[in-house]
Image (spheres, helix red, strand yellow):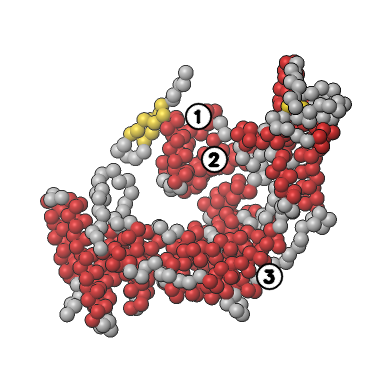
């Protein structure tokens, strides 16, 4: 006969939920697989599980220790992080995964030198360990040394060309430095490896739009359209399509056919935006105001096209 | 000529046929677990990891290059294939042919392979031959020539006996190959008890032919990349997109957990 132990958990100020042990464990697993970063919830649920139900978890407990430790570092719960780390060290002495966690704890305490030494020792044993390299780069990022971080990340990517996380991180760093050309390169890598991901297309289009210049505007319009084709509901891409098309149409250097085509695209985009906003509220009073606001905004953005 | 019909003692079925099946099966399972215990980890060098990822990147460039602008595609193709300093043209890896003398780990691997697979088979085959000798075990359903007699009828000295009647040793060997599918059912694919697969590997040459392959792989990629052209997938994207209204179904329903941006 299963004895289920129920426990009250507060998930935020206003909601009180009663959760059963198996549900807690499954929730943790779901968050782990989806890579959610809801650290406070993980700490709540995880602490509960570790303190009350450790015996029932069996071998799952080690991966839960890891998950809870990282979440605890996020929430500044050093005590909890320390306990988790001790348990893991006891069970897996000499493991590189545990060493990396120890390094992360040092990072959280801002002891960057010690953390760096820790990662270096991991790399001495196993030069192909990507996790340690990436932690070293994030130390540089945490210290605000973005130029060095960019350089290190470039070196890392020369060796591990296939690491998509790293390409994305590099594109973010470049965008922060306003180096849009290089950020576009990184996003192209991501688009090639994930051709069906509409978010990469949209981000690429935004970078091209920010770069400016007629060619880049055309490219950005095309990639906004691609993002829309991959996901019809991407409102940001829809607005982006409208803006790039109207921008091109307003450019003095374009010839008449291009201008006409872009005006047509912009008009179509306006239509779709209006449709979306009308679907949103279906006649509620607030919605009528917002529909009107959208129309006025679109008209004001329309630079004269004669 | 009508064959004489033999009626075998049913004790043979009980005490010979079935035990041999069990013995073979259990020995196979034991072999599987022993091979897991004796497995050595293969450590990959940084260069190997890096090279494999570069090859993957080049392949992706060929397959999905049509999603990035023409200029970017050409830039990458140039990086890989340029005559003077393209990556595939220039990078030569040191090729060390893995012969058993120079590579000690290969030697131990070969030894382990032999010990786990060939040795038990020989030993147990011999033991079965010695224990269950002197009688006929079973009959194969198809006729055989007289050439097979000394091979299949080890302990039986009857000149006139049909070659289809075989001894227990041959029943054992039959089992070794026949139980292969049972192993994959019970132990999962890629199990250590799969005798015939291992023998195939030994016949097809050294399993670690990777180092030499890197240079050849680079050359193959270079050729393939030379041939690829850029067909931009986004050529007529606006027309395709605007040929119909956007599908905004379910966009604002309450069930959507995540934002649309």
Say left or right for A259 vs A178. Answer: left
Q: Residues within 10 Å of mark 2 (few under 14, many from 20)?
A: few
In depth, the one of A85 and A24 nearer the eye is A24
In depth, the one of B14 and B46 nearer the eye is B14
Q: Which quadrant of the figure has residue B50? A: bottom right
- Residues marked 1 and 2 touching at CB (< 8 Å): no
Q: What whole-number distance in Å separates the C-alpha atoms at marks 1 and 2? A: 15 Å
Closer to the chain start, of discs 1 and 2, is 1
Q: Are marks 1 and 2 on the same chain?
A: yes
Q: Is residue B32 visible?
A: no
Residue at 79% from the left image edge and 43% from the top image edge: B114
Q: Which residue is tagged 2?
A: A63
In depth, the one of A60 and A262 nearer the eye is A262
Which numbered dot is residue B147?
none
The subunit carrying tag 3 is B
Residue at 38% from the left image edge and 63% from the top image edge: A201
Residue at 13% from the left image edge and 49% from the top image edge: A284
The subunit carrying tag 2 is A
Q: Which residue is tagged 3?
A: B92
**Secondary-structure class at tag 1:** loop
Q: Is residue B200 above or below residue B86?
A: above
Quadrant where the C terminus of chain A is found in the figure: bottom left
Q: Position of residue B218 (x, y in %)?
A: 63, 67
Q: Which numbered mark, 1 or 2, is in the foreground of this view?
A: 2
Q: Residues within 10 Å of mark 1 (few under 14, many from 20)?
A: some
The subunit carrying tag 1 is A
Q: Are marks 3 and 2 on the same chain?
A: no
Residue at 20% from the left image edge and 52% from the top image edge: A280
Which numbered dot is residue A53?
1
- Residues marked 1 and 3 touching at CB (< 8 Å): no
Q: Position of residue A7 (x, y in %)?
A: 40, 28
């Amino acid at each position: 006969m299963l004895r289920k132990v129920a426990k009250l958990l507060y998930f935020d100020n206003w909601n009180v939920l009663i959760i059963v042990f198996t549900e807690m464990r499954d929730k943790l697993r779901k968050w782990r697989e989806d890579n959610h970063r809801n650290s406070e919830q993980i700490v709540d649920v995880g602490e509960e599980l570790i303190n009350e139900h450790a015996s029932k978890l069996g071998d799952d407990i080690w991966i839960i220790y890891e998950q809870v430790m990282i979440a605890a570092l996020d929430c500044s719960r050093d005590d909890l992080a320390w306990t988790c780390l001790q348990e893991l060290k006891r069970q897996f002495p000499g493991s590189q995964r545990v060493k990396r966690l120890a390094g992360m704890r040092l990072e959280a305490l801002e002891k960057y030198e010690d953390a760096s030494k820790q990662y270096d020792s991991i790399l001495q044993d196993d030069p192909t360990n990507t996790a340690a390299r990436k932690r070293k780069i994030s130390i540089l990022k945490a210290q605000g040394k973005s130029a060095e971080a960019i350089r290190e990340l470039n070196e890392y990517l020369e060796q591990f060309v296939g690491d998509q996380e790293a390409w994305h991180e590099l594109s973010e760093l470049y965008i922060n430095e306003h180096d849009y050309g290089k950020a576009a390169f990184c996003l192209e890598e991501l688009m090639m490896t994930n051709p069906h991901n509409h978010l990469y297309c949209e981000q690429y289009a935004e970078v091209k739009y920010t770069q400016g210049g007629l060619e880049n505007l055309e490219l950005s319009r095309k990639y906004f359209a691609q993002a829309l084709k991959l996901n019809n509901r991407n409102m940001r891409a829809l607005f982006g399509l409208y803006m790039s098309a109207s921008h091109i149409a307003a450019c003095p250097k374009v010839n008449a056919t291009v201008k006409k085509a872009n005006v047509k695209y912009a008009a179509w985009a306006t239509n779709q935006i209006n449709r979306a906003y009308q679907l949103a509220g279906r006649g509620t009073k607030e919605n009528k105001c917002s529909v009107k606001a959208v129309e006025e905004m679109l008209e004001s953005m329309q630079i004269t096209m004669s | 000529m009508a064959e004489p019909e033999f009626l075998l003692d049913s004790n043979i079925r009980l005490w010979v046929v079935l035990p041999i099946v069990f013995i073979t099966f259990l020995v196979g399972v034991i072999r599987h677990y022993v091979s897991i215990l004796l497995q050595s980890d293969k450590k990959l060098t940084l260069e190997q990891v890096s090279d494999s990822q570069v090859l993957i990147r080049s392949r992706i460039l060929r397959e999905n290059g049509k999603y990035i602008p023409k200029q970017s595609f050409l830039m990458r193709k140039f990086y890989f294939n340029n005559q003077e300093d393209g990556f595939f043209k220039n990078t030569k890896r040191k090729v060390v042919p893995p012969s058993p003398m120079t590579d000690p780990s290969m030697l131990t691997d070969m030894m382990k392979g032999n010990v786990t697979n060939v040795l038990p088979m020989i030993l147990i085959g011999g033991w079965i031959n010695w224990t269950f000798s002197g009688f006929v075990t079973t009959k194969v359903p198809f006729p055989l020539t007289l050439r097979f007699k000394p091979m299949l009828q080890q302990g039986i000295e009857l000149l006139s006996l049909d070659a289809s009647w075989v001894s227990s040793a041959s029943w054992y060997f039959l089992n070794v190959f026949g139980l292969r599918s049972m192993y994959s059912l019970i132990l999962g694919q890629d199990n250590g008890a799969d005798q015939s697969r291992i023998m195939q590997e030994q016949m097809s040459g050294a399993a670690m032919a990777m180092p030499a392959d890197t240079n050849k792989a680079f050359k193959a990629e270079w050729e393939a990349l030379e041939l690829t052209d850029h067909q931009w997938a986004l050529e007529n994207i606006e027309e395709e997109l605007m040929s119909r209204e956007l599908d905004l179904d379910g966009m604002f329903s309450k069930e959507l957990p995540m934002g649309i941006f």
